[in-house]
């Protein structure tokens, strides 16, 4: 557990020294020196408790994207050539083409385009967009 930090301000009325715990930031107290109300605020200081909540997770989608160039395409091409070598090539070629087609498709994040390892991935590893 982190220690509670304390902040120091000077009373705007009497310039008296006021120290208060961080979680009191934003409150108004009566100055212990002159009893006038003093807002416990420090310009530029963002109290951790009152800090705005983290930005909403970006909703993304896993998109299947075919690649026109790449290994998958090359594999498909090899399969196509093998198709003409009857009969073994036809079988192997077909299998290779299916395999190449699978390879040519990649799952990508719709937000940042990062490659996603599987359809069950719930969050983009690159931009942290949620796919749920
Ligand atoms: Zn004062
Ligand atoms: Zn992403």
Image (cartoon, rainbow, N blue to C red):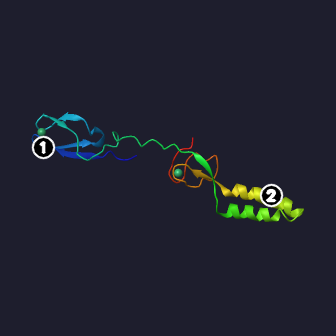
Q: Which residue appears at 81% of the width and 58% of the height?
A: 94
From the top left corner, tell me how far across and down residue 68 is, in percent.
64, 59
Helix, strand or loop status at disc 1: loop
Quadrant of res 98: bottom right
Between disc 1 and disc 2, the foreground one is 2
Residue farthest to the right, as pictured: 87
Asked if residue 83 is positioned above or below residue 14 in the image, the reply reads: below
Q: Disc 1 beta carbon < 8 A from ligand 1?
A: yes
Q: Which residue appears at 32% of the width and 45% of the height?
A: 4
From the top left corner, tell me how far across and down residue 41 is, in percent.
23, 41
Asked if residue 129 is positioned above or below residue 92 in the image, the reply reads: above
Query: Which residue bears the numbered disc 2?
Result: 95
Q: Residues within 10 Å of mark 1 (few under 14, many from 20)?
A: some
Asked if residue 21 is positioned above or below residue 109 in the image, the reply reads: above
Q: Which mark is residue 16?
A: 1
Residue nearest the viewer, comparing 107 with 118: 107
Asked if residue 102 is positioned above or below residue 61 in the image, the reply reads: below
From the top left corner, tell me how far across and down residue 76 is, in percent.
74, 61
Residue nearest the viewer, comparing 17 with 105: 105
Cβ atoms at labels 1 and 2 below 8 Å apart:
no
- The earlier-in-sequence mark between 1 and 2 is 1
- 130 vs 15, left or right, is right
- 9 vs 112, left or right, is left
Determine the CA span between mark 1 and mark 2.
Answer: 83 Å
From the top left corner, tell me how far across and down residue 84 is, in percent.
84, 64
- 28 vs 56, left or right, is left
């Amino acid at each position: 557990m982190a220690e509670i930090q304390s902040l120091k301000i000077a009373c705007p009325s009497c310039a008296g020294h006021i120290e208060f715990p961080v979680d009191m930031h934003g409150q108004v107290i009566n100055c212990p020196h002159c009893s006038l109300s003093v807002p416990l605020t420090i310009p530029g200081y963002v109290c951790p408790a009152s800090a705005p909540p983290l930005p909403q997770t970006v909703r993304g989608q896993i998109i299947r994207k075919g690649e026109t160039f790449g290994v998958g395409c090359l594999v498909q091409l090899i399969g196509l050539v093998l198709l003409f070598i009857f009969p073994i090539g036809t079988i192997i070629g077909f299998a290779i083409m299916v395999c190449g087609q699978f390879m040519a498709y990649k799952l990508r994040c719709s937000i940042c385009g990062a490659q996603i390892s599987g359809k069950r991935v719930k969050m983009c590893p690159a931009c942290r967009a949620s796919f749920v």
